[in-house]
Image (cartoon, helix red, strand yellow):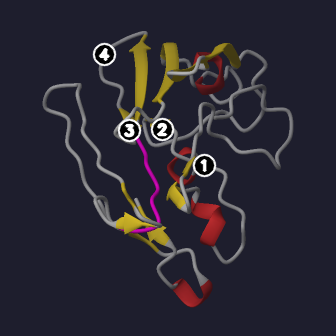
Amino acid sequence: FKCGPIISGHQDFAPGMWGLFKGDLQVAFAKTTSHSGIAQDPWDNNGISIDGHGANPRGDSGSKVLWVEDKPEYLHLAASAHTAFNSEQQGWNAVEEYYRELMWLKPGADGRQFVVIADRVRFREAGHVAVWHLNTPGPIATRQAGSTLFLHRLLPDGAQSGQHEVRLGTAGAVSGWR
């Protein structure tokens, strides 16, 4: 889980990006298996995009982790990143509020564990679109290193889900799924 100021062009433009490793990558970053290693946008890093673009690459001083709570039963992280999507220089000022929370419910007696991601996005006016991105090494519900990743969307009602190959490997080879 990563969220903080964007101060360099070599950083990722995906505040709140996250990954999941259990024996192998379950939720990956597109750059992990890409040919170049340069994949900085939210669609490459399990972030959100707003109206088709990622965070402001010219700098963001307000994104920050709000809290980290690590207990024997769970890990809870929260971040605020609305300033990352607004830029007077770029003419972007649509996002009034963007919070991301990650909750890892650690393995219980039965060994099962769960990760919950909650994004709260509020726009200054209607008509904007937020897209949630997830990168995996294989199709959802495919076993990786003895584990199976399942995805269950809770909200918003009417949201659409899709899945396709990501071709960032050498000579356009499949490097993962999104």
In the displayed structure, does residue 24 sit left or right of residue 117? Answer: right
Residue at the spot 60% in from the left edge and 49% down from the top edge = 41
Q: In terms of secondary structure, what is the magenta stretch mainly?
A: loop
Q: Nearer the viewer, residue 119 or 131?
A: 119
Residue 56 in the image, given as x and y percentages of width and height: 67, 33
Q: Are marks 1 and 3 in contact (CB under 8 Å)?
A: no
Residue that mark 2 sits on: 49
Classify 56 as above or below 87.
Answer: below
Residue 112 drawn in magenta? no
In the displayed structure, does residue 107 sit left or right of residue 125? Answer: right
| Residue positioned most to the bottom | 171
Cα separation between marks 4 and 3 = 15 Å
Residue 134 drawn in magenta? yes
The amino acid sitting under disc 2 is Ser
- The residues colored magenta run 132-138
Residue that mark 1 sits on: 41
| Mark linked to residue 126 | 4
Residue 167 in the image, given as x and y percentages of width and height: 49, 75
